[in-house]
Amino acid sequence: MRIISGTAKGRKLLSPRNEGRITQKGEMRATRPTLDRVKVSMFNIINPKIYGARVLDMFAGTGSLGLECASRGADTVILTEKFKETYDILVENINLLGFTDSCKAYHKDSYEFIKSSGSNGEKFDIIFVDPPYLNNMVEESIRLIEKYDLLSENGVIVSKYDKDESIYKPDGKYELIDERKYGKTILGFYQLRI
């Protein structure tokens, strides 16, 4: 994994030993790196929103998505990771890239982080929802983001699905505005309903 653009362009990220392992349903510890071509496409779509943004990278793993935003000029990047081995690598990646001023990692369950952030009135311009595949966690994440009102008015939620997962189509205040398929990966983009 590497940073593809910005101040840290070309820098490699440390990865856990389980990287690339096939994620089985219910296997929460397997880390799935975002392939470069998927990452390039994702960031081409959201790039105009990144500079100066407040970013939340849920289920951050080793930080590939959030750290890409930091490299591209995001103001604040919050990264949450539940599993200690992966969290330690995430912190090391933040330090290696020199992003300690703009990035803050939390060793915490992402759902719990949403609840505590919502209670504090926090808002984010970009929220990445990239949980372990085949666990149907995107829908619950977006429902919690909506309940605790974490998305800014012009913000975007970016989610990743396995091709075998159903794409969540909310009927509340958020809507699915775009979806893109890249091999076995589907990206879903959500915004406030207009």
Image: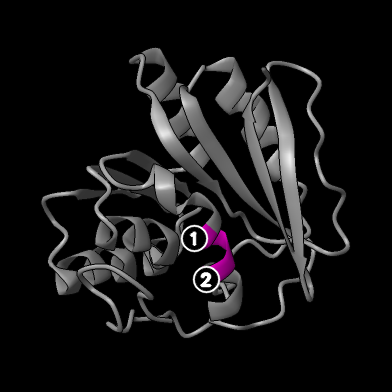
Give the residue pinned by disc 2.
Answer: 40
| Residue type at numbered disc 2 | Val
Is 36 placed left or right of 171 in the picture?
A: left
Dot 2: element: helix
- Characterize the magenta stretch by its predominant secondary structure: helix
For disc 2, the neighbor class at 10 Å (few under 14, some 14 to 19, many from 20) is some
Dot 1: element: helix
Is 99 placed left or right of 163 in the picture?
A: left
Is 152 placed left or right of 122 in the picture?
A: right
In the rendered image, is residue 78 in sight?
yes
- Tell me where residue 88 appears, x and y as whole percent: 30, 66
For disc 1, the neighbor class at 10 Å (few under 14, some 14 to 19, many from 20) is some
Query: Disc 2 versus disc 1: distance between alpha carbons?
Result: 5 Å
Q: Nearer the viewer, residue 71 or 137?
A: 71
Which portion, as a residue range, is magenta? 40-44
Any magenta on residue 42? Answer: yes
Residue at the far front in the pictured view:
48
- Tell me where residue 156 appears, x and y as whole percent: 54, 37
- Tell me where residue 20 appears, x and y as whole percent: 60, 83
Q: Which mark is residue 185?
A: none
Q: Residue at x 22, y 64 (%)?
A: 94
Q: Residue at x 56, y 27 (%)?
A: 145
| Residue type at numbered disc 1 | Phe
Contact between labelled residues 1 and 2, with CB atoms less than 8 Å apart: yes
Q: Give the quadrant of residue 126.
A: top left
Q: Give the quadrant of residue 45.
A: bottom right
Any magenta on residue 29? Answer: no
Q: Residue at x 51, y 61 (%)?
A: 44
- Tell me where residue 87 appears, x and y as whole percent: 35, 62
Q: Which mark is residue 43?
A: 1
